[in-house]
Image (tube, grey):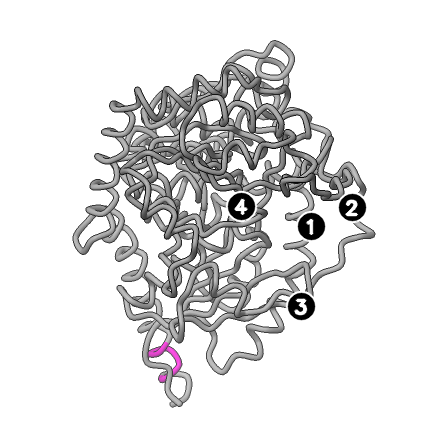
Amino acid sequence: MQNTKPHAALLSSPGMGHLIPVLELGKCLVTNHGFTVTIFVVTTDNSLSKSQLLKQSPCPDLLNIVLLPPVDVSSLITPTTGILAQLAIMMRKALPKLRSAILAMEFCPTVLIVDFFGTEAMVIADEFNMLKYAFMTSTAWFLALTLHMPAIDKAIEDNHVKNQQALLIPGCKSLEFRDTFEPVLDRNDQMYIEYKRMGVEMQKFDGILVNTWQDLEGTTLGALEDEKRLGRVAQVPIYPVGPLVRAITPGPKSEMLEWLDMQPIESVIYVSFGSGGALSARQTTELACGLESSGQRFIWVVRPPIEGDSAATVFKTKHRTDDTPDFLPDGFLTRTRKMGLVVPMWAPQTEILSHPSVGGFVSHGGWNSTLESIVNGVPMITWPLYAEQGMNAAMLTEDIGVAIRSKSLPAKEVVVREEIETMVRTIMDKGDARRARAKTLKSSAEKALSKGGSSYNSLAHVANDCETAFKYLKVKATWTST
């Protein structure tokens, strides 16, 4: 069998927030640019299957998905090891498995594309003479911080951490202390060390892809290219290729979507905190009371509360007389049965946000969820809980203009029911300007991804470089064989 077109190998770290944009990038390379694509997924659980992955982002027959065997990092972490450090350790531990999987392939891939946590895999790309690209599945602003951080190492501690001053990023929005990215707060913590390493390593790739587009973050993208600003630390081309979001899953309509069909246009607020977000018991109660007192229709994806950090115990779920879980206010389901739906654990988010009855989104502000909201023209209430979500909330509210946020910091304090009620009413009843802005960006996103659009052309540039490398390697192989 002859290798007739460029072959891209994509590496995804654990977690749907990382995997979904990697899958979508792979689909674009296949359908728009004629690549063969293999996606390597680092797993943490033997029960994970390809069918489960494809439910999240359907792509029958387009991609070859390889689940790398689960890695055991239990001896390398402690209960206090941060999530960023854990993911970095998992990806490091998985490198031998990735190398073996590539060696077992009939043809070596032309290019290796890794997500933010997989930058150490560049040594494998170099070993096999592959082009190498990093893929930032978050914002260009977060990429700017990542690339700039190694250059301002000590200044972060002196000014940003000790004095809580805004962190200046040349040519970009400054990062206020309240919105900061947690790993930068302690230079002795492993999360800080891993994050700094990633910023250094990304500068050694052939380019960096980022899940955004020109109209959304034009100023930051310009700073990343400007040699007088961040271009001098980036040192590599930046390719905005977004928004890459999960496609609507075909299939029979659920009862939830049928319920939405019966609601007025833009009358329902959707509440979900992503695959990893969790609230305390008190915050869950306050949110329930705030939704109820707002009088607005809602769909709420609710999980049992978790107290403290990620190692805390999940509350056992019991039920009261009206089938209300014991972590919700007594009688909540009875009182709200005509105005809302409470959905346990998971809901088809893409389908919900694309429904015309949905007019607002209470979100943790993870970048996948944010993009899904924007591409459907839905304004947001941002509720940042972890990772770079505080940065996302600041950008969405202060710069992009599609969201509002609470005065309280949800990751550190309880947002009370009165403030929740006010925010819900604001976004649903008085959110015309934000809704109009979201719909403008929806059109802009469609244009960016269409043939000839800014993101389409940006990915085409990468594809052309890979095509050139592929042809060169074919010629070189012919010379060697003769």
Give the crowd class for mark 1: few <14, some 14-19, many >=20 residues within 10 Å. some
Distance Cα–Cα, label 3 vs label 4: 33 Å
Q: Are marks 4 and 2 in contact (CB under 8 Å)?
A: no
Residue 475 colored magenta?
yes
Q: Which residue is mark 4?
A: 343
Residue 47 colored magenta?
no
Q: Are marks 2 and 3 in contact (CB under 8 Å)?
A: no
Decide which of tag 4 and tag 2 comes sooner along the chain: 2
Figure quadrant of the N terminus: bottom left
Give SS at disc 1: helix
Q: Type of residue at label 1?
A: Ile
Q: Which residue is mark 3?
A: 69
Q: Type of residue at label 2?
A: Ile
- Residue 259 percent coordinates (x, y): 39, 48
Instruction: Give whichever of 400, 283 is nearer the camera.
Output: 283
Give SS at disc 2: loop
Give SS at disc 4: strand
Q: Closer to the camera: disc 4 or disc 1?
A: 4
Q: Which residues are magenta?
A: 474-478
Decide which of tag 3 and tag 4 comes sooner along the chain: 3
Q: Are marks 2 and 1 in contact (CB under 8 Å)?
A: yes
Q: Are marks 3 and 4 in contact (CB under 8 Å)?
A: no
Decide which of tag 4 and tag 1 comes sooner along the chain: 1
Distance Cα–Cα, label 4 vs label 1: 34 Å
Distance Cα–Cα, label 4 vs label 2: 34 Å
Q: Residue at x 67, y 58 (%)?
A: 44
Which disc number belongs to residue 89? 1
- Residue 289 percent coordinates (x, y): 55, 24
Does residue 84 appear in this view?
no
Q: Are marks 3 and 1 in contact (CB under 8 Å)?
A: no
